[in-house]
Amino acid sequence: MEDSARTAQLAERLAAVQHRIEAAALAAGRAGELPTLIVVTKFHPAADIRRLAALGVGDVGENRDQEASSKAKELADLGINWHFVGQLQSKKAKSVAKYAHALHSVDRPGLVDGLQRAIAIEQDTTGRNALQCFIQVSLDDDAGAHRGGASPAEVPMLADQLAAAAGLELAGVMAVAPLGASPEAAFEKLAAISASLVAEHPAATAISAGMSQDLEEAIRFGATHLRIGSDILGSRPAVG
Ligand SMILES: *Cc1c(COP(=O)(O)O)cnc(C)c1O
């Protein structure tokens, strides 16, 4: 596709998603506090991120370290925020600490330890900001259909660990609605988990929820961060 045609296509889809967000926020009585739109750009080229930044996008999401790291390096001049939204192996903490502003997939104590060490090194050498950390919660009752994350019972322990970790900031919770179940029920459960977390950690108010298919339901149940990919960028290869 021609460069200008792709830019026009992205502009049109971005505007349509922004319109859906505004309508859903209005319907939820939240018009004054629109959630942050994170455009998930995995599998799409760095050139698309450059186009999106020119259209005003300031937050992008990626789910594989190698891809994210090379895009962040190539696009360092844009000054955008990089959100890591995929499962993360502890050995990748060092790499992610070099470019990520936020990590949406904290799911186990060992990862927090690795991140703390990695951020400390980056802060010493580059003076980077604290890493915003979301605890990913699994909302599956059925462990077989699992889309990643800690169990709800593990959230308080991970939250205390993050709150005590230098260089890491406990932002809140994140979840992906389980396949084949109602997103409303899932996001309602996430809202309750968030409320319990905020009771112990009053600043940890963020809720990262809502993708292309379910952003309206997520906004209804208090999402503060939306992660939208395909409705803006188009389809991507199914395997990766
Ligand atoms: C890919 C991805 C998204 C975006 O999903 P779409 O359905 O393309 O909007 C959101 N969150 C996570 C964790 C993802 O991996």
Image (spheres, helix red, strand yellow):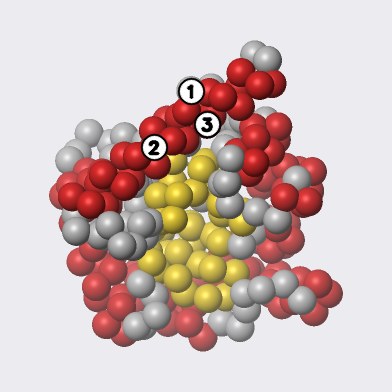
Residue flagged by tag 3: what amino acid is it?
A: Ala
Q: Quadrant of the N terminus?
A: top right
* For marks 1 and 3 on the same chain, the one whose residue lies earlier in the sequence: 3
* Viewer-nearest of discs 1 and 2: 2
**Picture quarter containing residue 110?**
bottom right
Q: Residue at x 62, y 78 (%)?
A: 167
For residue 199, side relative to residue 58 (left or right): left
Q: Residue 194 in the image: state x and y as whole percent.
A: 28, 69
Q: Residue at x 74, y 61 (%)?
A: 98
Q: Is the residue marked by circle 1 packed among few (<14), some (14-19), or many (20+) residues within 10 Å?
A: few
Q: Residue at x 35, y 52 (%)?
A: 209
Q: Secondary structure at mark 1?
A: loop
* For marks 3 and 2 on the same chain, the one whose residue lies earlier in the sequence: 3
220 lies above or below 49: below
Residue 151 can be seen, yes or no: no
* For marks 1 and 2 on the same chain, the one whose residue lies earlier in the sequence: 2
For residue 219, side relative to residue 132 (left or right): left
The image's mark for residue 17 is: 2
The residue at which mark 1 appears reads as 235
Q: CA distance from mark 1 to mark 3?
A: 16 Å
Residue flagged by tag 1: what amino acid is it?
A: Ser
143 lies above or below 33: above
The image's mark for residue 222 is: none
**Picture quarter containing residue 177?**
top left
